[in-house]
Image: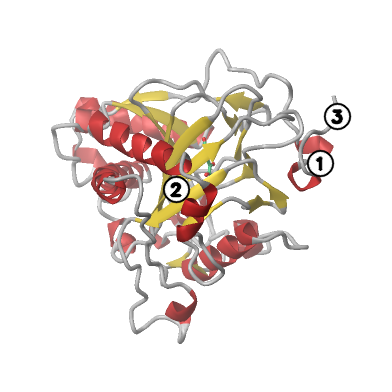
């Protein structure tokens, strides 16, 4: 079969999806968050009741083996997800000129965009981004001039009605879930539950609406090319399947099965660095199909732009477990990623291995 799409979308042969990605008999783990639905997360793992200790063991195993898991009984009311999905679908159904009223530009990366690139190949999708806490202002102590290039201000469309309210209500609930997951992960690292919370004062988290229209050449293009998330954690809602995760044990791409009222969670690069490589940020991508459209809503949970990311000192032992990364500035990393998504560049975009220490 030849190509019916613009060459800008065509993946190199080694990155093209197989006609059917296997849905593994044992896919990414499914974790029931009921033990923390109505009870507080304990301040330290040692003091945890048995149900929470079991939950921590499941989270730890999932982060070690997959870097991905699905959660149920997560506490985000289903009507908030229904409302934001409806808002997303309503927005993408608008005429192109209406969507372009809130188009991102090279100064402000928020709003609508339909020519995003991942690793310099165009993605088969359109997106809308907004930050969870606005504006994500850099405090006076940050790099001089830094807030001039990252004024994270939302652009709200006039239509569909109720769009902004649906976004803001959902963001609040998903943000609460993000903090719970962060605390669980801190406990699995043997740290106090709130050890990582301070990095998220002035957080730069954002929510993205993805719309993947049907694609006439799904064997050549991808909805999102293979990548790892640069932030701390991602909480993803999807309507139908299409997300493929690279299994760490053998590098096979595995399709994540949609489970109603669940979220897909993955650890991002920042947790990989904080954990000094105990946990891995897993590569993933989105396959498209020729018959139906797909919608997804990731919540990218990101620390403040001024945070310097480096292995946590409690997890480092200069003799037995030396730090594997040099510190890097999250705002610089984020800006560089956003720029590489904005236009095709001739070089590889920023990756955490660029900050790996020589051994
Ligand atoms: O649509 C999805 O399932 C995943 C989206 C994703 O990986 C991204 O937007 O970075």
Q: State which quarter of the image contains the N terminus.
A: top right
Would you call the spot at circle 3 few (<14 residues within 10 Å), some (14-19), or many (20 or more)? Answer: few
Residue toward you, 151 or 145: 151
Please tell me whether mark 1 sits on a helix, a strand or a loop.
loop
Rendered residue at 53%/70% (across/down): 332
Disc 3 or disc 1, which is closer to the eye?
Answer: 3
Q: State which quarter of the image contains the C terminus.
A: bottom right
Extreme residue in the right direction: 2
Q: Which residue is mark 2?
A: 208
Would you call the spot at circle 1 few (<14 residues within 10 Å), some (14-19), or many (20 or more)? Answer: few
**In the drawing, what numbered circle is on residue 12?**
1
**Visible residue check, residue 150:** yes
Rendered residue at 58%/17% (across/down): 24
Extreme residue in the top direction: 25
Is the distance from the Cβ of mark 2 to the nearest ligand 1 atom less than 8 Å? yes
Is the distance from the Cβ of mark 1 to the nearest ligand 1 atom less than 8 Å? no
Please tell me whether mark 3 sits on a helix, a strand or a loop.
loop
Disc 2 or disc 3, which is closer to the eye?
Answer: 3
Residue toward you, 263 or 278: 263
**In the drawing, what numbered circle is on residue 2?**
3
Please tell me whether mark 2 sits on a helix, a strand or a loop.
strand
**Residue 52 in the image: above or below residue 92:** above
């Amino acid at each position: 079969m030849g190509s019916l799409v613009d060459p800008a979308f065509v993946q190199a042969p080694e990155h093209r999806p197989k006609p059917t990605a296997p849905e593994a008999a044992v896919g990414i783990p499914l974790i029931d968050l009921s033990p923390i639905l109505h009870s507080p997360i304990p301040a330290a793992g040692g003091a945890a009741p048995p149900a929470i200790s079991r939950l921590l063991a499941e989270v730890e195993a999932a982060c070690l083996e997959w870097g991905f898991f699905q959660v149920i009984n997560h506490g985000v009311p289903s009507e908030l997800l229904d409302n934001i999905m409806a808002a997303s679908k309503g927005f993408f159904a608008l005429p192109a000129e209406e969507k372009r009223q809130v188009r991102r530009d090279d100064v402000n990366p928020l709003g609508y965009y339909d020519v995003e690139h991942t690793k310099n190949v165009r993605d088969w999708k359109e997106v809308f981004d907004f930050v969870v806490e606005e504006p994500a202002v850099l405090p006076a102590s940050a790099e001089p001039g830094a807030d001039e290039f990252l004024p994270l201000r939302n652009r709200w469309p006039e239509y569909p009605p109720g769009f902004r309210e649906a976004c803001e209500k959902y963001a609040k609930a998903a943000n609460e879930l993000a903090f719970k997951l962060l605390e669980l992960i801190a406990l699995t690292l043997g740290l106090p539950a709130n050890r990582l919370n301070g990095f998220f004062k002035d957080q730069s988290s954002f929510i993205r609406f993805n719309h993947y229209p049907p694609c006439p050449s799904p064997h050549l293009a991808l909805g999102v090319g293979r990548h790892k998330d640069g932030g701390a954690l991602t909480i993803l809602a999807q309507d139908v399947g299409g997300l493929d995760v690279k299994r760490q044990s053998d590098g096979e791409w595995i399709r994540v099965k949609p489970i109603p009222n669940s979220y897909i969670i993955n650890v991002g690069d920042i947790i990989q660095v904080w954990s000094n490589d105990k946990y891995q940020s897993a590569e993933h991508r989105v396959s498209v199909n020729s018959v139906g459209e797909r919608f997804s809503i990731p919540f990218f949970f990101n620390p403040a732009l001024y945070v310097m990311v480096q292995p946590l000192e409690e997890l480092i032992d200069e003799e037995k477990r030396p730090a594997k990364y040099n510190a890097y500035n999250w705002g610089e990393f984020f800006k560089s990623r956003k720029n590489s998504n904005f236009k095709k560049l001739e070089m590889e975009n920023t990756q955490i291995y660029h900050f790996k220490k020589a051994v």
